[in-house]
Image: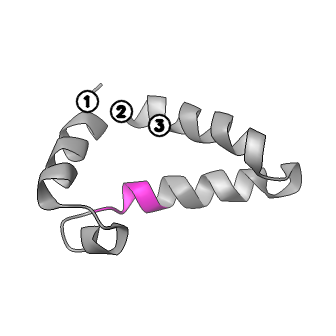
Amino acid sequence: MNKKMAVSFIKQSAVEKIELKELERFVEVIETELMSLHEGNIARYRLRPVEYEKWEITWTAP
């Protein structure tokens, strides 16, 4: 999913699982982690290079 879709999905999923007082910070952390994802840190998330490449193409799509 692209950025806009991801943010919407994160917020929707978080509302169901995260306490309201922590929701905003949770979403902020997730967005920050996604925006700082790069080839040098994908192993932290157990992503293969092929998965990262596919994600990067979709993430930057309008």
x, y percent for residue 28: 61, 55
Q: Indicate left or right for 46 with 13 as reference.
A: left
Q: How far apart in space, not on screen, are marks 1 and 2 (Cα)?
A: 6 Å
**The disc label shown at residue 2, or none:** 2
Q: Could you tell which of marks 1 and 2 lies nearer the N-terminus?
A: 2
Per the rendered image, the range of residues in magenta is 33-37
Q: Residue 12 appears in which quarter of the rendering? A: top right
Foreground mark, 1 or 3, reads 3
**The disc label shown at residue 6, or none:** 3
Q: Residue 43 appears in which quarter of the rendering? A: bottom left
Task: Name the residue at 63% across, 51% down.
Answer: 27
Secondary element at tag 1: loop
**The disc label shown at residue 61, or none:** 1
Task: Name the residue at 65% across, 39% down.
Answer: 13
Q: How far apart in space, not on screen, are marks 1 and 3 (Cα)?
A: 12 Å
Secondary element at tag 3: helix
Q: Amino acid at mark 1?
A: Ala
